[in-house]
Image (cartoon, rainbow, N blue to C red):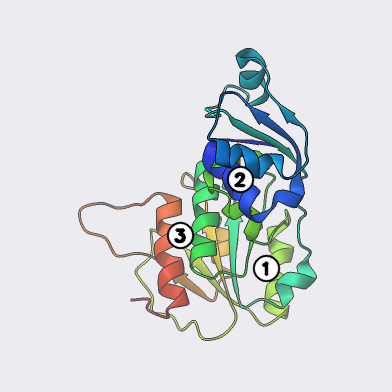
Amino acid sequence: MIVYGKQVCLYVLEKHNNLINEIYFGKEIDKAIFNKFAALNKPIIKPDPKKMQSLAKGGNHQGFLLDIDMKDEFDFKFFKGCSKIIVLVGITDVGNIGSIFRSALSFGIDGIIITNTFNQSGVARSSSGAFFDMPYMVYKDYMTLINELKHNNFKLFGSSPNESTIYGNFDSKWVLFLGSEGEGLPNKIIKKMDNILSIKMNNFNSLNVSVAAGILMYRMVNNEMH
């Protein structure tokens, strides 16, 4: 997998340098940073600008690019032992997914389940590296997933802007389901939830899904939903 951009590459260097296969620099960089990469004894390549841009697929690489091993998914056995899980249903925007990974790591969420394939490299970059420290898995059959979670004694919460705010108690094992900005959660998922949560707002009727996710996660982790 290719990741690029200074911040995410430095995050991988500091916390997951065992994943690095090759290092690409598109410009002269700080000597101290270069020495840290060189100490890994991995190939360091300095391609011409056109090649560097091609590897980054036109993205803003800032002179930093790494070829790294793909991060492994966790399996459902891991998630059965968790107490705080986020499920993303139909969310494909890498910026939103990355922001949710970053918030989830910050607020102590145990793992994220995604119901569709997604661009791992893009999420690694948009999450500023949090992707590498947050357990996740792809589980495409979300109705079977709901049944599995219920069977393992999770309380299921769905997020919807169309409902009144409902108070909740989050002392037990819980899962928060988040839908895409355009469609939200499908009705058949809403009907399976134990409770529906929304965020009371003034002068506006919706939030970006990653912003809403951050607010709900914070309140649920701290048992402050109101």
Q: Which residue extends farthest left?
A: 203
Q: Disc 1 marks which residue?
A: 146
Please tell me the numbered disc located at residue 124.
2
Residue 223 spot, x, y in % from top left:
42, 81
- Residue in front for this viewpoint, 44 or 77: 44
Which secondary structure lies at badge 3?
A: helix
- Mark 3 crowd level (few <14, some 14–19, many ≥20, 10 Å Cα): many
Q: State the residue at coordinates (49%, 51%).
A: 99
Q: Circle 2 sits in a helix, a strand or a loop, which is it? A: helix
Q: Earlier in the sequence, mark 1 or mark 2?
A: 2
Whether residue 197 is visible, yes or no, is no
Q: Nearer the viewer, residue 7 or 113?
A: 7
- Distance, label 1 to label 2, CA atoms, is 27 Å
**Location of residue 31 with respect to 131 vertically, above or below:** above
Q: How many marks?
A: 3
Percent of width and height locating residue 179: 53, 54
Helix, strand or loop under label 1? helix
Q: Which amino acid does label 1 sit on?
A: Ile
Q: Residue visible at 53% across and 47% down? A: 128
Q: Name the residue under label 3.
A: 213
